Image: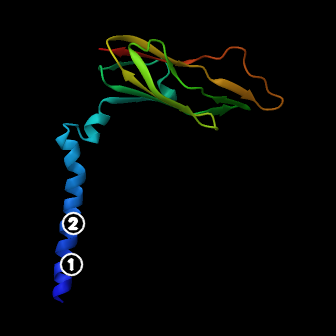
């Protein structure tokens, strides 16, 4: 019975030591916890086309676009680009085989940059893609 009594406190103590060991380096390095860092990230989606967003220098802007299908036409995305990398620099970007795209931009310095991506149209048999396709754009003001 004595072994069971000692096993529980030691297990709890080891768990507390493990949690403290993981949390300590972050605090020791002066880094903010993840929830504080997430406050400095703005996420834009398909619905944010045409939107103007303000970001502080050092903040991140993430763009997540999902493909969509309408009337036998499938619209997929390439990797979004920044119109001014000195203001808003892309740090990562990817596409999926299904046509979704994501990119993260880092606000470098003051100014305005436009993030742009043009959707690609793929038509089912018997359908025709439109001649004009409107790009997805968002204006990012870094100040």
- Sequence-first tag of 1 and 2: 1
For label 2, count other residues whose C-alpha is less than 10 Å away and answer few (under 14), some (14-19) or many (20+): few
- One can see residue 20 in this view: yes
Q: Which mark is residue 14?
A: 2
Quarter of the picture holding the N terminus: bottom left
Left or right of residue 95: residue 34: left
Q: Position of residue 46 (x, y in %)?
A: 52, 28
Quarter of the picture holding the C terminus: top left
Q: How far apart in space, not on screen, are marks 1 and 2 (Cα)?
A: 10 Å
Q: Position of residue 96 (x, y in %)?
A: 60, 37
- Regarding mark 1 in the picture, which secondary structure is present there? helix
The color scheme shown is rainbow
Proximity of marks 1 and 2: CB atoms separated by less than 8 Å: no
For label 1, count other residues whose C-alpha is less than 10 Å away and answer few (under 14), some (14-19) or many (20+): few
**Residue under the image location 30 percent in, 19 percent down:** 57
130 or 14: nearer the viewer? 14
Left or right of residue 71: residue 58: left
Q: Quadrant of residue 133?
A: top right
Q: Position of residue 15 (x, y in %)?
A: 23, 64
Q: Which mark is residue 95?
A: none
As drawn, 21 above or below 128: below
102 or 108: nearer the viewer? 108
Q: Quadrant of residue 14?
A: bottom left
In this view, the residue farthest toward the bottom is 1
As drawn, 87 above or below 69: above
Q: Quadrant of residue 10?
A: bottom left
- Regarding mark 2 in the picture, which secondary structure is present there? helix
Q: Position of residue 4 (x, y in %)?
A: 20, 84
Left or right of residue 90: residue 122: right
**Residue under the image location 22 percent in, 49 percent down:** 23
Q: Which residue was labeled with disc 1? A: 7
As drawn, 62 above or below 111: below
């Amino acid at each position: 019975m004595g072994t069971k009594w000692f096993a529980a406190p030691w297990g709890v103590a080891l768990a507390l030591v493990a949690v403290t060991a993981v949390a300590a380096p972050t605090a020791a390095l002066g880094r903010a916890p993840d929830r504080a860092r997430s406050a400095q990230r703005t996420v834009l989606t398909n619905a944010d086309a045409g939107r103007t967003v303000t970001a502080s220098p050092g903040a991140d802007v993430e763009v997540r676009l999902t493909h969509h299908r309408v009337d036998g036409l499938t619209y997929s995305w390439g990797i979004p680009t920044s119109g001014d990398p000195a203001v808003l620099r892309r740090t990562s970007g990817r596409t999926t085989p299904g046509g979704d795209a994501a990119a993260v931009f880092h606000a470098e310095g003051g100014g305005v940059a436009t993030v742009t991506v043009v959707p690609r149209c793929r038509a089912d048999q018997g359908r025709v893609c439109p001649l004009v396709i409107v790009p997805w754009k968002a204006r990012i003001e870094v100040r």
